[in-house]
Amino acid sequence: MSQLLWLIPGAPMLSALIIALLGGLLQRRHLAILATCAAAIAFLVVLLTWLAGAATSQPLQQTLYTWIAVGNWNPTIGFTLDRLALVMVSVVSGIGLLIHIYSITFMAEDNDQRRYYFFLNLFLAGMLILVLADNLLLLYLGWELVGLCSFALIGFWYREPMRASAGRKAFVTTRIGDMSLALGIFLLYSQFNDLSLSYLLANATAQWETGSQLATLTALLILGGAIGKSAQLPLQVWLPDAMAGPSPVSALIHAATMVTAGVYLIARTYPLFELAPHVQWSVAAIGTLTIVYGASAALAQNDFKRVLAYSTISQVGYMFLALGCGAYALALFHLVTHAFFKSLLFLAAGTVIHFSGNEHNIHNLGRLDNHSPLVRWTFLIGAASLAGFPLITAGFYSKEAILTATWSAPAGPLLWAFAAFGVLLTAVYIFRVYFIVFQGSRSNASTPSAPGSMTWPLLILALLSLIGGFVEFPVGWLAPHQWSVWLEDEFRLTVHPPLEIAYSLQFITSLLTLIGIGLALVLVRREQAGHYLTKIIFLRTGWGFDALYQTMLIQPYFSLARLLKATDALLIEGILHKMTHACLLLASACRRGVEHGVLDKSIAGLLAGFRFGYARLSATQNGLLSRYALMISMGAVFLLSYWLW
Amino acid sequence: MIPLTHSLIIAALLFTLGLLIILLRRELLFILMGLEVMFNGAALTAIAAGQYWNNADGQVLTIFLMVVTAAELAVALILVWLAYEHFKVTQVNMLTQLKDDTRGEPP
C-alpha cells in the first residue's frame, strides 16, 4: 500500500503539469474534467489506504528519492502517512474533489480556465505534499507552494486592481510568517544536523530541557509561521481581502485547507511546544483573542463573503485555543468539522452570489428573495453547524469538546470566558446573515436552481456538517469517544475538568448558542428599521488593523523610501557628480603629463637605441662570402683556442 | 712508415692552404677548389690516424668523405653555373644580394 503514497500528491501534480504544458490543445470542458479526475484519483488512493487499514496499522512510509545529497545531509522526497496525516489527507483530498466538481459549473463561463485549474491542482498537490512530508524541507516546499497558489488564485481576476492587490497583500503578509518558519527550520538544522521530523522531535525531547531558551525560540518561530498561514492575530489582515478570489477557491484554500496548515504544523511539531510551556500558553491566548476579534468583526460586515472570512479567522482561533491547551486531537476534530461546514457555507454563498449577478451586499441579496430552497437549507445547516446548534450538528460536538478542555489549562476559566463569548457572537453573526439574506425568500417560478455539478457538493457537505461530529461525544456522555481514542497514540490524552463542571459548561455554551440565535433575530429587526450594524466602524474595519498597519508600517516605510530617495539625489547630484568631474580633470592632466613627459620620451629613446644597435649589427651582414668565411674561421679559432687552452 | 707528425703537418698545410684560397680568391671556381683542398687535408688526417692506430675506420671515413664531396661539388657547380646564368658574374664579391639595406627603416 505504501507504494501508492506518491500518487496522492502526484496525481494533481501531474495533471497540473499537463494543463500547464498541453492545456492549449484541450477544450475548456476537458480541462475541468482532467483536473477533477486528478483530484478524484488522489481521493481514491486515500480511500484505498483507509480500506487497507492505514487507520489501525503502523504509519506508512515511502521514500521516492534523495532530493539533495550534500556531504552527510540527504533530505529525501519521502512521505509518511500516520493518523494525523491521514486525517489531513482525507479532508484535503475529499473537500478538494468536491470543490473541483463544484468548479466545473461555477467556472464554466470563465475564459481563463486553464490558469484556474492549473493553480487549483497545483494547490492540491502542494497541500498534500505539506501534510505527507516526512521532513521539514519537503514540508516547507509544500508550504510555499500553497502560498504561491493562494496568491495566484486570490488575484485570479487580476485585471481588477483591487483583486490583484489583495493577492499581493496576502502574499506579503504570509511571507512574514513563512520567513519565521524558515528561520525555525534553520535553527533546528543547526542544532540537530537533520530535518527528518521523527528524528528531530525525538531528539529535541531527549536533549532539550522543558522551558530552555532554544526550545522556546524554536517554538516561537514555528508559531510565527503558523500564525501567518492561519491568519491569526496579528497577521490576520490578509484573509478578509483574500475573498477577492472565486468562491470555490475561498472555500478550498481560505476556509477548509490552507488556513488550517498552521494548525497542522503545530499539531505535527507539538513536542516542541510542550518543551516551551510559555509559548504553548501564548498559542492559546492568541487563539482566544482571535476568536473574539474574528467574531466581533464578522458582526459588522455587509459583504457576504467577508462575514465568512472573519468567521474563518475566528474558527481557526478555536483550533489554536485547543492546541494551546494541549487538546491536539480536539483541534484536529474541529479542523475537520470546520472544513465541512465552512466550505459548505462558502459554496452556498458562492451559489447565491453567482446567480444574483455578483451581488455581494447581504442587504441587497435579501431584497432579491428568490434564492433556491436547496441553497437556503444547506446554508441553514452550515450556519447551525458553525454556531454549534446543540445535539444535531457537527460544529456543536467539536466546539463543545474544545471549550470543555480549555477549563483545565493555565488561566483556563479566563480563556473559557472569552471563547464562550465567541460562541455567542458566532451564533449572532451567522444567523444575522442568514436572516437578512434568506428570511424573506420564498421559492417561486423564477427561482434558479443550482445545476447538477453544484448540487452534489452542497448536499454531501451538508450531510457531513450534520453527522461529522458523531465520532466524538462530549466528555461525560455515555456515547463513543472514537476520535480521541483513535488518536491516542499520536498525542497525549486531553485533560478534562471534573464531570459536574463539564456538564455545566456544556449547558452554558448550548444556552449561549440559542441566546445568540435569538439576539440575531432582534438585531435583524433593528437593522431592517435602519440601525445598521455596519455603522460601528471599529468593527467593520476589523478593529482598525488595516489603518494601524497603514500608519505604523506602510507609511513609515514609504517615508523612509522617500527620505532615501532625497538623500540619494543629494549625494549623487551634490557630491558624486562633482567628484566625477574633478576626477576627469585630474585624469586628463595626468594623461598629458605622463604621455608627453614620460612615455613618449622613453619610447623614443628606446627606439633610437634599437635603431643604433640594428645599424651596427646590420654591418656584419654585408653579403660578402669571403667575409662570412673569415668570420667562421675566426670563430673556430677562438673556440679551439679556448678549449685547448 | 711515415711518422704521424709528418702526415699531420702536411694535412694542416693543405687545410690552411685551402682556407687561404677561400678567403683570398674572388673566382667562384677557385673557391670550390679551395674547399676540395681543405677536404683533402681533413681526409689525410683521417688516414694518418687510421694508420697510427692500425684501424681501418680512417680509410672507410675517407672513402665516405670522397663520395659526399663529389655530391656536394656537383650541387655547388650547378649553383655557380646558375649564378652565372642569372647575374652574369663569376666573381664572389659581386654576389651581394643578401646584403642588409641599412638606409631604409628597420623591418
Image (cartoon, rainbow, N blue to C red):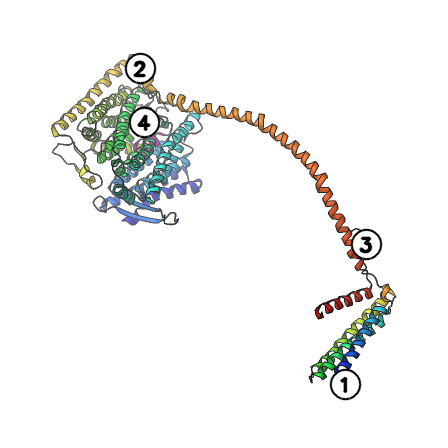
- Disc number at residue B102? 3
- Mark 4: give few (<14), some (14-19) or many (20+) Cα within 10 Å: many
Q: Position of residue A77 (x, y in %)?
A: 35, 46
Disc 4 marks which amino acid?
Leu
Residue lying at 22% horizontally and 39% vertically, measured from the top left: A491
Q: Position of residue A390 (x, y in %)?
A: 18, 26
Residue stretch in magenta: A246-258
Tell which residue pokes out farthest to the bottom in this image: B1
Residue that mark 4 sits on: A233
Disc 2 marks which amino acid?
Tyr
- Disc 4 sits on a residue from what chain? A
Residue that mark 2 sits on: A532
Q: Which badge, 1 or 3, is on the more N-terminal residue?
A: 1
Q: Position of residue A481 (x, y in %)?
A: 16, 36
Residue that mark 1 sits on: B2
Tell me, yes or no, whether dots 1 and 3 are on the same chain.
yes
Disc 1 marks which amino acid?
Ile
- Disc 3 sits on a residue from what chain? B
Q: Is residue A298 above or below residue A192?
A: above
Comparing labels 2 and 3, the label whose residue is closer to the camera: 3
Give the main secondary structure, helix, strand or loop, of the magenta stretch.
helix
